[in-house]
Amino acid sequence: MVSKDLMAASTRPLILTILKRGESYGYQIIQDVKEMSGGTLEWSDGMLYPVLHKLEKDGCIKSRWDVSEEGRRRKYYSITETGKEELATAKSQWMSVHEVLVKLWGPSKQWA
Amino acid sequence: MFNLENAIKTWKRQLRSNPAFEDGDVAELESHLREEIDRMRVKGVPEKEAFQKASEKIGALDSIGDELHKTRSPKIDATPPWKQKSWIPTMLPNYLKVSLRNFKRNFVFSIINVLGLSVALAVALLVITFIKDQASYDTFHPNAEHIHRVITTVGGDNSSHTRYASSPFPVAFLLSSEFPEVIRATHIQPFTEAASFDNRRFILNGFRADSSFLRLFEFSLESGNPENALNSPNSIMLSRETAERFFGDANPVGQVLNMQNGQLYEVTGVLAEEKNRSHLEFEALISVSQEEGSSMMNTGLKSWENPSWYTYLLLTEQANIEEFETKLGNIVELHYPGDLESGYQFNLQKLTEINLGERLARQIGRITPIEFVYFLAALAIVIVLASSINYVNLTVARSLKRVKEIGLRKVIGAARFQLIGQFIIESILIAVISLGIGLLIFWSWLLPFWNSLQLATADFGQIAFNTSRDIELYLYFLGFSVLVGLLASIYPAIKLSSFSPTEAFRNRLTKAQSLGWSLRKMLVVLQITISLVLIISTFLLYRQSSELLNADYGFSKSDVVNVDISDASYELLRQEMANQSGVEGISATSSLPGVNFQTKMWIGREDHLDSLSAAFYSVDEFFNEQFELSIIAGRNFSSNYAVDTLQSAILNETAIQRLGIDSPQDAINTFVEFKTTGEMYQIVGVVEDFQFDFLWNPISPMIMLNNPSGYRFINIHLSESNQASALQNLENVWKKIEPIAPFNYRYYQDEIDSVYTDFRELVFLVGFLAILAILIACFGMLAMSHYDTQARIKEIGVRKVFGANVKDVIMLLFSDFAKIVALGVTIGIPVSIYLNSLWLQVFVNKTGFSIWLIICATVLTVILTFASIGWQTYAAALMNPIKSLRSE
């Protein structure tokens, strides 16, 4: 399991990455995350929605209501240009943190 | 039996009970829940278990709600309002909103309220800044607190005594040698002399000063040693500016200046440009060395009779001023034996109290008469008072209309302290806003306006800003406006918050109306009193000023121009100029009657001990004719009598009377003595009295000598036409005779006018402030009458229904005000008579109170009052009772 703080920090880029692949709705997004992480990333489902709303308010994603084939109302989210920009920034930031950690934890292991 | 739909409904109800979830959120979460349940059902989980697991997975609804709220709130660390415990910060925006609405609803009256207070605060700021500025004079000397000036009272206890800023020459010597309390003493005497270097020649104004001067006062030096710069004879020190005029950029120290009397003076130092202000202003200091001082003691200056020097003392910190003055009394007994008639007395005056102090005779340098400061301060206080009264009045009146708001707030749950707090906050807020506007008015308009007045710049200097000093001042003002806000609101706040909501809603306003009515009545009486006092004062001041400005000087001055003779020869100028066309007459004098300060001399009759101080003029034989002064006994000076330039004198009528000579004829050929020098002059003529002094001084004794070395001004009487070409010719003549000094001429009338510019500006200023205060008072009464008639609108309606006509209603409303006006007038008349007699006594030709003046002022006050309240009253009387009574 990943710590709460790290989860909180990674939620936004995670959602944005998923939405970059295509329009999706809350339940599906959670399923995607679970599937990809093999269950290591998990948060209480309801907490996704405040994050989605915040992203929408910040202009990173936009939403629309639609009805599925089964006749269920769903709120679909898709990424905006602002969202793509934020994702790019987040990506480079995550990568630089990642690189430093990899170097530090590299073969010599003296810092670990 | 578990029913899924029911379970979901219950779950949704739980969601809806939390205000953070909006309908969309609920729908979205429901969709999520159903999706999860469907998924589990596919896996074969029973309905009940699937619902429980799915809702568990969604998580704690409360914390989701908090998160959702955060995303919607603009604040970073938003706490949902339904979780807030603290009440006051929550209500503050509401208070402000309600204040603003109240302000808008009573826009005109609120603006009167705020602007009145702003203007008043701005005026008060100006006055206090001015007083502080004036009080800062001479405070820069490190020992300022212990420096005193010896002042002399001549004439003892009788009412005609004169207080001089000066003292006799020997005082400084005696005090420094015999009084242990005196650490150091210095004395100075003003001089005005021409000095030249190469071909540069300027008139210098400065002091003769002994070597202690620079050690007692801490004027900063640019070069030279304060210990010895004035030690040797014929040393001169120059101000930075004067040094530049003479020597440009060259080093002035060691250069030699040629003075008017032919003596040479060596420059021993330069005074740095003084940033600090002192009552002593000088361009140069001329040394009085110890030897010179001692030798002066052996000449006429040893006399104790002539207070013509200015003595300053530095006392020890322990010195007791009262004891010291008693000891000074002993000196008097020693040095004026048996001369009880003239009644000499010495006192000390603190250095820091010279500038803002008593008006003394023979003032040295500049002073701001303390009376003027009292006058300004009184006006400022009146204006602030008037507007504060308005403020209190209007705040009280306005809050009466808010009884229902108070009731509503109480029903909703406001505690009493919250209501009190609301009123006080609102009132203080408006007061502080007024101060803000007041500061704006002060900086952007009032201060530049003040600094543009000649009165301000010439006599007092521009008000300089001193940040640290003024910050303190602004803090005082902030405190003051908060206090006004507090005082205005505390009474209505406490009273109004005591109503029970039921009373408030049942429109039982009688209690509310009665509250504050007597307080307000009193305040309105005060307003009327103030208005009346100001109207009477303005009338008097105007009358006094026009009396002064239209006064008859008793001499003819039209078409006369004056020229400063400088170094030119008067005889030569006269010869050349008298022949020019357009010149009707030429004369010369040592100072200009009605314009310049004159020298005073102590004169007395031959063989008589008592002496008197007389204005002293040196004039030529054409002077009296030129100015159409009539010789009422004896003869004018004449070139036919060779002795005239040496030993003849003409006195005015007043001098003859004061000398105790029965009639002008008896004076002819008797002798007067200059008491300080012992010189004797024969009286050859007596001139009719004319006003040579400033108009507020009575005509005093004067003596004229025919001494050519004293002439400083040439008076040229031009013919009425072609004055420009005549002046051009005169300038050409002047340039031939005096190539260096410029031909500076001024019309006599202009010179006289410029003397009284200050006075006119003062009158203007006082009138302006008075009108301001009256206006504020009128607006206050207008606003008051509005509220009072509003409060009685139902009573009026009932009366009209029962048959009262418009006239009856107006009479009813007016009779209430009439009592207040009558009371205000009754208090106002004696107060204004008392206050105005305080300043009127300064003037000689004083204008008096007349019944008519008081009647006019009273009528004007009454008219203003009723005009202010009239239209409100009239509107209330005309109002249709159907409207006012509809709600009953």
Image (tube, helix red, strand yellow):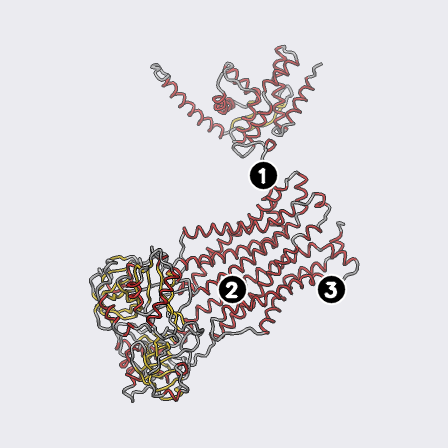
> Disc 2 vs disc 3: Cβ atoms closer than 8 Å?
no
- Which of labels 2 and 1 is toward the front? 1
Name the image quarter holding the N terminus of chain B: top right
CA neighbours of label 2 inside 10 A, class few (<14), some (14 to 19), many (20+): few
> Which residue is more in the foreground, A66 or B193?
B193
The answer for how far apart the CA atoms under marks 2 and 1 are is 45 Å
Crowding at label 1, few (<14), some or many (≥20) Cα neighbours within 10 Å? few
Q: Quadrant of residue B263?
A: bottom left
Residue A73: image tag: none
Query: Chain under label 2?
Result: B
Q: Tag 3 or tag 2, which sits nearer the N-term?
A: 2
Residue at (69, 59) in percent of width and height: B875
Quadrant in which residue B774 is drawn: bottom right
Name which residue type carries label 2.
Phe
Q: Compared to B550, does A76 lie above or below?
A: above
What type is the residue that disc 3 sits on? Lys
Which chain hosts label 1?
B
Instruction: Identify the amino acid type marked 1.
Output: Ile
- Residue B88 is labelled as 1
Pointers 2 and 1 in contact (C-beta within 8 Å): no
Q: Earlier in the sequence, mark 3 or mark 1?
A: 1
